[in-house]
Structure formats: structure tokens, C-alpha cells
Amino acid sequence: MDELVPTAKEFGSDHTPILGVIAGMALMAAGLYFLHGHMGG
Amino acid sequence: MEGNLTTAMLLTTGAGLATGIGGLLAIVGRKPGPRFMGFTLGFSAGVMVFVSFVELLGHSIDDVGEPVAYGAFLAGAVAFFLVDLAVPHDCIGHHEHDGVLAGENGHGRGTREGRLMRAGLVTAIGIGIHNFPEGLATFAGSMRGTHLGLVVGGAMALHNIPEGLAVAAPVYAATGSRRKAFGWSLLSGLSEPVGAGLAALVLWPFLTPTVLAIFICAVAGIMVAVAMDELTPAAKEFGSAHAPMLGVLVGMAVMAASVWLLHAHVPAHAH
């Protein structure tokens, strides 16, 4: 929040950073789901 | 049920309007400088992120399971992204005003003020939606008994103060208007008595725990997207290097204490 998002915003594209955040969260959500699914958590 | 309808509505209204206290905290004193604004916007982002991941998403996973909760959360974030695409950035809240609210960077004020105004309004709507089930909880607690209602209502009121601050800070930064900032913070809390009123009248049979949990996950997704896409970059633009991150940490700490107090003093079924 302190470095990556503001730096991403500085590259000029208004919408790409939040799309990247959403894609990152989706990837982690899938990762967590599979991890918990296969570890019985 | 031991409680009566009038007491329940009064307690719910009082708890909801505590957002106005947070709004007052954001606007009292002289016109805030860039460091204060960076801090309060960071504070708002910290509140939003902590509440979303810990209070909203965390609890909803228990109710509907990971796939549904994550799906609804991401759907909320994508919905925000689509609205972000559809709404031109310069068309909202393009205000001209002087004073230190402009920050130190100076450039792109119109765009930043538009983003801040939108952040404030989306935060108000997000917190308003988030307060809706809290209104249901306070109402339900009050209808079970005045003592439980006071405990739940008091905890909700404490919980709502930083949320009011989170709404008022970006609106104040965007418009420079104390009245608008306070008004929006107050309005975001009104959804609690509205939630209680609707619960009393019509919604009670339809709001199943599953529907409510999915709805809350989507709200969490919207709030995280707002914090990431609007609040944090706007806080950084005010020029102070460390105040935004300090605000994020303090916001998270205040909400952590508030959530802990809520859970420690309010029975689990009431929130």
C-alpha cells in the first residue's frame, strides 16, 4: 500500500494497477482454496 | 422478546449516528495541512482494508465457505473496477478552492479532487451497506433485551467512530467543505436505523445468513478496491512521505482494538 500501488499509479495508466491488484488477489484466493482443499484445512 | 420497538430503534439510531462523531474529528480545528490529510486518508485506507479482510471476509468464509466468499469478494472488486472504467475521472467533484488542501504537489488537482470525492462517496456507500447488517444486529439485540441492546449499541457506536472519520476525510479533502464531510459521515451511519426499520417491517424473512454473508463479501471487495485504487495513492499525493503509512497502521490498530472490544463484550450471535 505504501510503495507498490502508488508506484504503479505513477506509470500513468489509471485502470491497470487496480486490475493487477484484483488479478493478484484472485490468484491468491485460488492458491489458498487449493492449499486448504488439499491439506484438509 | 423483552425489549420494545421504540428502545430498539433509539439504540440503533444512536449507534448509527456515531459515525458523525468520526466526521467531527475529521473536520474540527483549523484547515488541515498535507501531513494531516495524508495521515487521515491513510487512516481511512487502513480501516477499510482491516475491516474488509478481518471482519467482513473472515467471518463470511465461516458462513458460506471459501469458494463462494472469495468469488463474491472478487466480484465486488471487479464491480468497482467496471464502475471505475465507466465513470470519467475528471467529471466528479471538480472543485476549485484554495488553501493547504491542495497539497504540495500542486499538479492534477482537479483529477485528484474528483478521485477523492468519489473515494469519499464510495466509502460512504460501502460503510453504509456494511452498517446495514450492524443495524440488524443492534435491533435484534435490543429486541432481546434493553441491556443486551445497550451493550451491542455501545460497541457498534465505538466501532462506527473511525468509520465516520474514514468517510469524512476524503470528502473534506475533495471539497474543503466541513458541512459536506460531516453530512456524508452522518449519512453513512443512517443505514443502521434504516436497516433496523426495514428489518422490523419487511426484510427479516428474506435475509438469510447465506445471502447476507455473500453480500458482505462483495462489500469487502469494493472497500479493498477503493482503499487500493483511490485512498492510498491520494494520500501519497499530499506530499508527506511517511504520514500515509502511519495513518494506515493507526487505522488498522484502531479497528483491531474496536473489533476485539466488539467481540469480547458482545455475544457472538449478536454481530
Image (tube, rainbow, N blue to C red):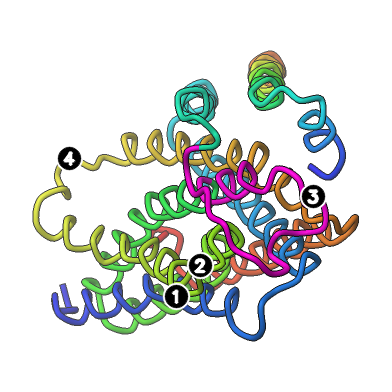
Cβ–Cβ below 8 Å for labels 3 and 1?
no
The earlier-in-sequence mark between 1 and 2 is 1
The magenta span reads: B91-118
| Residue at image location 71% in from the left, 22% down from the top | A13
Cβ–Cβ below 8 Å for labels 1 and 2?
yes
Q: In the rendered structure, which amino acid carries the disc numbered 2?
A: Gly
The earlier-in-sequence mark between 2 and 4 is 2
3 vs 1, front mark: 3
* CA–CA distance in space, label 3 to label 4: 43 Å
Cβ–Cβ below 8 Å for labels 2 and 4?
no
Q: What residue is pinned by disc 1? A: B20
Q: What residue is pinned by disc 4? A: B206
| Residue at image location 13% in from the left, 75% down from the top | B5
Image spot of residue B159 (x, y percent): 52, 69
* CA–CA distance in space, label 2 to label 3: 21 Å
| Residue at image location 77% in from the left, 52% down from the top | B106
Quadrant, the C terminus of chain B: bottom left
Q: What residue is pinned by disc 2? A: B164
The earlier-in-sequence mark between 4 and 1 is 1
Circle on res. B207 = none
Q: Is residue B99 magenta?
A: yes
Image spot of residue B91 (x, y percent): 48, 38
3 vs 4, front mark: 3
Circle on res. B236 = 3
The earlier-in-sequence mark between 2 and 3 is 2
